């Protein structure tokens, strides 16, 4: 098969591993920096042009769209969809996952366990907002944050109030969330492909840090999930419409709760911690499902 990895940087671990794994399985792999593509949007012959040449005859794409490049990145993915090329994750699902609030609303609708969460922009009713999640201590998050930046633990009511006021002054959208203290500064990253959790790790924040992000110095180790955790992760990915997803769970005393669902989950941390060939499994999934689309095309044709 001919597979494109949409990534701005061919030297990134995840991009390299996907390219390697694809080659090992006998496929033709190409890394395409999607920001450098342009598109011809016509119904007769929709195309994507890169370096002056149309990108043709691809069987599948694996989008690795950066969080700050969602708009253009998903447009390129959508254009491949218009051209009937199978995508590991659909453009629509990628967009959906990039909005933390939308993500939580979709999961809530599907009955997935979540931390109690409030959402606000410029409310005057700070007391009411704090009460919604059961008072302090609580976690306050900037809607647009990643890698733990913009996630604050407010231990007291006063601290919560001043942080909310400060964020309101910045004209920001904020999430206010029940603090899952019993998680002990750790979360679980479940790597979902199709209907399966193929690898899982526990990330533990450094001492005294409630955020477990590896970017904040957290450490990861392989972990065995409970059946409930496994089911929750799969249900979350399915609800988001993602075939490949990193689902982050917290172990709360009311069962596993989902914090976020990532549509371009990194491979380095999880492969290192679990020794699972996650890249290889992504390729297998893509190959299997891209050929399924081919079959349906045949059916339509005849
Ligand atoms: P980001 O997108 O920046 O990674 P997260 O929502 O994942 O933001 O939060 C970062 C980290 O903070 C999480 O990995 C988790 O360890 C911790 N955390 C976030 N929300 C809560 C919460 N409600 N209770 C306890 N810990 C939390
Ligand atoms: Mg996170």
Image (cartoon, grey):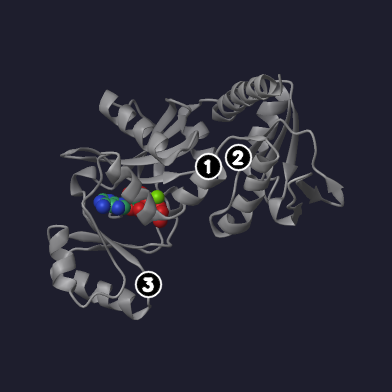
Report the residue at 30% width, 39% height from top.
110
Residue at mark 1: 266
Q: Does the beta carbon of the residue at mark 1 sit less than 8 Å from ligand 2?
A: no
Label 3: few (<14), some (14–19) or many (≥20) C-alpha neighbours in 10 Å: some
Residue at mark 3: 172
In the displayed structure image, the side of residue 96 where residue 293 appears, left or right: right
Report the residue at 49% width, 39% height from top.
269
Report the residue at 59% width, 24% height from top.
289
Query: Are the two marked residues, 3 and 2, in contact with CB atoms closer than 8 angstroms?
Result: no
Of residues 91 and 151, which is closer to you in this image?
A: 91
Separation of marks 2 and 1 at Cα, in angstroms: 6 Å
Separation of marks 1 and 3 at Cα, in angstroms: 27 Å
The picture places residue 218, in percent across and down from the top left corner, at 39, 47
Q: Is residue 9 above or below residue 122?
A: above
In the displayed structure image, the side of residue 97 where residue 53 appears, left or right: right
Earlier in the chain: of badge 2 and badge 1, it is 2
Closer to the eye: label 1 or 3: 3
The picture places residue 29, in percent across and down from the top left corner, at 74, 33
Dot 3 falls on a residue whose secondary structure is: loop
Label 2: few (<14), some (14–19) or many (≥20) C-alpha neighbours in 10 Å: many
The picture places residue 2, in percent across and down from the top left corner, at 75, 30
In the displayed structure image, the side of residue 77 where residue 234 appears, left or right: left
Q: Quadrant of residue 192?
A: top left
Dot 2 falls on a residue whose secondary structure is: helix
* The disc label shown at residue 14, or none: 2
On the question of residue 211 being in view, the answer is no
Query: Are the two marked residues, 2 and 1, in contact with CB atoms closer than 8 angstroms?
Result: yes
């Amino acid at each position: 098969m001919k597979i494109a990895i949409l990534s701005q940087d061919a030297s990134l671990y995840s991009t390299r591993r996907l390219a390697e794994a694809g080659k090992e399985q006998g496929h033709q792999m190409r890394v395409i920096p999607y920001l450098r593509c342009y598109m011809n949007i016509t119904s007769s012959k929709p195309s994507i042009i890169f370096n002056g040449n149309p990108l043709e005859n691809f069987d599948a794409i694996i989008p690795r769209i950066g969080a700050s490049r969602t708009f253009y990145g998903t447009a390129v993915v959508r254009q491949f969809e218009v051209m009937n090329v199978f995508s590991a994750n659909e453009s629509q699902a990628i967009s959906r996952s990039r909005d933390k609030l939308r993500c939580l609303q979709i999961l809530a609708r599907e009955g997935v366990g979540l931390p109690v969460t409030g959402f606000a922009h410029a409310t005057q009713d700070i007391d009411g907002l704090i009460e919604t999640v059961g008072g302090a201590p609580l976690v306050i998050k900037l809607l647009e944050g990643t890698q733990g930046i913009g996630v604050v633990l407010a231990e007291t009511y006063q601290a919560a109030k001043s942080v909310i006021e400060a964020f309101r002054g910045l004209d920001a959208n904020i999430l206010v969330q029940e603090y899952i203290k019993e998680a002990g500064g750790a979360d679980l990253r479940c790597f979902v492909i199709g209907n399966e959790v193929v690898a899982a790790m526990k990330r533990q924040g450094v001492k005294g840090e409630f955020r477990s992000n590896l970017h904040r110095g957290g450490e990861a180790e392989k972990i065995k999930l409970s059946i409930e955790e496994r089911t929750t992760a799969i249900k979350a990915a399915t609800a988001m419409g993602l075939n490949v997803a990193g689902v982050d769970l917290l172990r709360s005393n009311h069962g596993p709760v989902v914090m976020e669902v990532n549509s371009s989950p990194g491979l380095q941390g999880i492969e290192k911690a679990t020794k699972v060939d996650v890249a290889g499994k992504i390729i297998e999934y893509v190959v299997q499902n891209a050929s399924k689309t081919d079959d349906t095309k045949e059916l339509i044709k005849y």
